[in-house]
Image: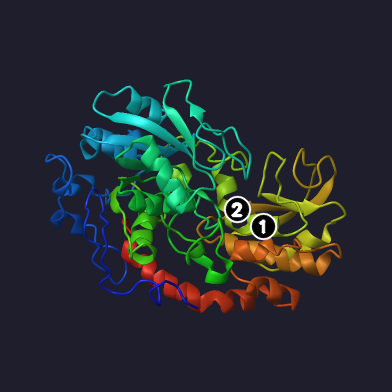
């Protein structure tokens, strides 16, 4: 499988106009396991930014949070926005700024960064760009908010959902900005559209001659490893534009570095990333000390995010993925399903998760107002849990135990998995380990490349 437009994804010695923590004009130096956190010392953002800004002021904290310390707040994660603010917004000095964000773009005390930036005379904020679900988060899946003016700040708000390439570049030009700032909470799955909003903004900014600053936030499900199939080019779509793993195990800043070097190398953007402090790859959101804001209407809690990379695959079937319930993506099912499905899923013995018989009545989406039988996922060991294998296990056992099982006629499952192999193997009767073995080689290649762009221990 081809992992990049330049052959196998992640050629050693890749160069491009990208930077870490304000470093622009050179790609990160490859490392065998992860990016060297000390390499930023040699980069100076003042090649195009304020003289007072130094990339090494934003190095990640190597120490883990200690729950027994007297002041737990002292150990919490500091987001990229907090680091930017602590430096007096030096990275943004003298520029007209447009922000790509949504309700998750908040401070540690739950103020929205647009409100904070607008009120600060040191920042010239002139525009806001809304992704899927909108800037203020009023729209459901597959929808966005109309362009207009933000009533709180009076700033113009542009709807960028579904726009890419020159069309989006023209929006940036019309907005009169110099730099695009991206700050959105991702949840770690390739088909969650915000990472492709980032990709599209980077590509469009390069076309329009604008710079991009990515303010990092935690991957709420951790960043220990990548999982699942790597996207094949034939199945690229708005829920997966480039060949990354289904569960990428990266932060948005790490993805930005990878995108710029691997997929946008022909025309890279002037990229700066501002790291967090206090975050480690084995951290889950509950340990960060940060407030949780639902990044979209059907991801109400960090537990939802934990299951999402697996159970969202049911969007490609005629079963409900739990939308319209209080626990979307933690329950899946359909009218007419009985306990045999949960029993078969539990018998797989997948690590870190129990599958329990469940019944629910969706208030919207599939099976509105009808009682559905199905399965509830109970994750009892987050470190051992692999959501992609869990999702595949549920698909395999649903097809075996419920005669009504069907794929969506448009084969949306192929866009979600990034390949037609998963669907065809399930139809042929393959089990979880056989299916996972089929994507193992591609995942191994992606993992090697991923390691070059990791910013945290």
Q: Which is more toward the observer, 355 or 220?
A: 220
- What kind of colouring is applied to the model shown? rainbow
Q: Residue drawn at (50%, 65%), measured in percent from left and top?
A: 245
Give the number of the disc on residue 354.
1
- Image position of 74 (left or right of 233): left
Residue 105 shows up from this direction: no
Secondary structure found at label 1? strand
- Mark closer to the chain start, 1 or 2: 2
Taking 305 as reference, is 424 above or below it? Answer: below
Residue indicated by mark 2? 307
For the C terminus, give its image quadrant.
Answer: bottom left
Q: How many marks?
A: 2
Q: Which is more toward the observer, 351 or 138?
A: 138
| Residue 19: x %, y % from top left | 25, 55
Q: Residue drawn at (31%, 56%), measured in percent from left and top?
A: 455
| Residue 261: x %, y % from top left | 33, 63
């Amino acid at each position: 499988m081809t992992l990049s437009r330049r052959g196998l994804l992640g050629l050693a010695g890749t160069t491009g106009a990208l930077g870490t923590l304000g470093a622009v004009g050179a790609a990160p130096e490859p490392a065998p396991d992860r990016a060297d956190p000390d390499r930023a010392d040699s980069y100076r953002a003042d090649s195009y930014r304020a003289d007072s800004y130094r990339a090494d002021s934003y190095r990640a904290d190597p120490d883990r949070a200690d729950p027994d310390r007297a002041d737990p707040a002292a150990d919490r994660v500091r987001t990229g926005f907090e680091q930017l603010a602590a430096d007096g917004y030096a990275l943004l000095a003298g520029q007209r700024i447009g922000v790509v964000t949504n309700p998750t773009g908040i401070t540690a005390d739950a103020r929205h960064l647009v409100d904070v930036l607008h009120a600060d005379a040191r920042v010239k904020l002139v525009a806001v760009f809304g992704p899927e679900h909108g800037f203020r988060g009023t729209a459901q899946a597959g929808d966005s908010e109309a362009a207009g003016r933000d009533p709180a700040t009076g700033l113009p708000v542009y709807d960028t959902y579904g726009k890419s390439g020159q069309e989006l570049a023209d929006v940036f030009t019309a907005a009169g900005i110099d730099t695009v700032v991206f700050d959105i909470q991702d949840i770690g799955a390739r088909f969650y559209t915000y990472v492709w909003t980032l990709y599209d903004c980077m590509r469009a900014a390069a076309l329009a001659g604008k710079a991009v600053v990515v303010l990092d936030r935690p991957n709420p499900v951790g960043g220990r490893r990548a999982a699942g199939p790597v996207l094949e080019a034939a199945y690229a779509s708005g829920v997966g534009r480039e060949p990354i793993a289904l569960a990428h195990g990266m932060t948005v800043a790490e993805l930005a570095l990878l995108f710029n070097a691997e997929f946008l190398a022909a025309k890279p953007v002037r990229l700066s990333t501002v790291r967090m402090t206090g975050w480690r790859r084995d951290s889950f959101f509950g340990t960060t000390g940060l407030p949780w804001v639902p990044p979209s209407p059907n991801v109400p809690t960090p537990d939802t995010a934990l299951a999402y990379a697996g159970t969202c695959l049911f969007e490609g079937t005629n079963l409900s993925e739990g939308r319209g319930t209080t626990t979307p993506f933690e329950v899946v099912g359909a009218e007419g399903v009985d306990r045999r499905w949960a029993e078969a899923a539990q018998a797989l013995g997948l690590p870190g998760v129990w599958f329990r018989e469940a019944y629910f009545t969706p208030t919207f989406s599939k099976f509105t107002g009808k009682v559905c039988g199905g399965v509830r996922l109970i994750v009892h060991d987050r470190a051992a849990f692999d959501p992609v294998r869990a999702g595949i296990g549920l698909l395999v056992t649903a097809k075996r135990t419920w005669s009504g099982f069907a794929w969506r006629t448009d084969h949306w499952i192929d866009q979600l998995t990034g390949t037609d192999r998963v669907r065809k193997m399930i139809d042929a009767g393959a089990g979880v380990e056989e299916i996972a073995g089929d994507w193992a080689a591609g995942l191994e290649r992606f993992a090697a490349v991923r390691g070059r762009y990791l910013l945290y221990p």
